[in-house]
Image (cartoon, helix red, strand yellow):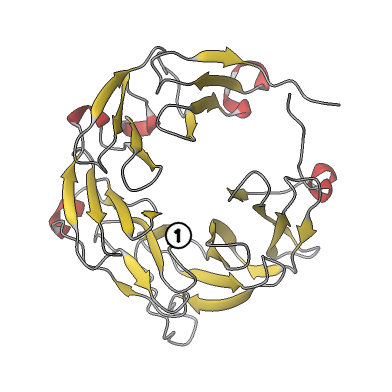
Amino acid sequence: MWSSVVPEALQSTPAGQALLQAKSAERAWIAVVGANGRTSKQTIVYSTNDGGSTWARSAPVPGADPVAIDFVDARHGWLLESMGAAMGRNPVQLYRTTDSGLRWSRVAESRTANTPASPSGLPVLGDKNGLAFASASVGWMTGECNCLEVLISRDGGAHWASQPVPVPARICESGGCEVPAPQFAGRTTFLQINAYPRTGYLLVSRDGGASWKAESLPAGAGPYPRLTFFGARHGIAVSAGAQGMVGSTFYVTSDGGLSWTAVHQGKVFSRAPFGFDFVSPSAGFAWIPGADSAGGAPDLEVTTNSGRTWTAFHPLEVS
């Protein structure tokens, strides 16, 4: 059985783009952009610590369109807003909270032609949509660029610098590179680099990013594999190609990406984009968003064996 836990204010008020981060079954945040009653935009962040039974509403965050939200613990979080992207340029603003998302302050922004020079180090070039903090101090920013720009901050997001990675920058010059936000497991950092039409790269650091080792991803994983790690050793790769088309074979690892085991899927995911959310290498969900599925209702599937078999189900809402 399922229950709706959408904040009451969003049930009756139309909202634009929304971002969700759930840290546990009890604690989550939703960032929503909408009009502020005049003509400009603002972002509101809703937070819950009781599984959605109640929600706290933040003070408005002025500015642009939210593209990423990340909380490293119950109090410290960051919100990345795009100020517009065009012709390979994407200035951004970064906001930080230290009170669970009730109040936000701008800590960094990109230089633009119409603003004074910023000391943050955030470049204008390259689309930025990946944000992940390993601690209240150390954070990473990634995105899409033809220059392989990976940024790191060591002071809570106030200042950013390029993070060298052992991949030739020239692989991004023709079709560009897509770098999802890194994933952390203690001192282990997993960084994925997609460079179409090549098979994606997986970089692994066991010392917080000081040194890296490149691991090979299976050729069948495609140029845009969706990697999820559940600790320093266990992970799953959902194979995917251009336009988000999903492959017929997924891959699991139990040694941190040193080797991968193929798992042929018991369902043909012929429509795109399909969403996936694995909570372990074996248990996961797949769905087509309601707007893209037949009849407007989400098509939902569940697996308990890494996708060897999938079972369709329809959520039953508790009234």
x and y percentages locating residue 238 in the rendered image? 36, 31
Residue in the image at 72% along x and 45% along y: 51
Can residue 123 be spotted in the picture?
no
Q: Nearer the viewer, residue 174 or 75?
A: 75
Circle 1 sits on which residue? Answer: 131
Occupied quadrant, residue 34 = bottom right
Residue in the foreground of this view, choosing between 117 and 179: 179
Q: Position of residue 220 (x, y in %)?
A: 22, 27
Q: Which residue sits at x=24%, y=47%?
A: 202
Q: Residue 298, image x and y in percent? A: 62, 23
Q: Secondary structure at mark 1?
A: strand
Which residue is found at the position 49% from the left and 28% from the top? 284
Residue 241 position by quadrant: top left
Task: Decide: is 114 above or below 179.
Answer: below
Left or right of 237 on screen, residue 217: left
- Which residue is pictured at 25% across the width and 59% down the height? 148
Q: Quadrant of the C terminus?
A: top right
- Number of labels in the image equals 1
Q: Residues within 10 Å of mark 1 (few under 14, many from 20)?
A: many
Tag 1: amino acid:
Leu
Q: Position of residue 147 (x, y in %)?
A: 24, 61
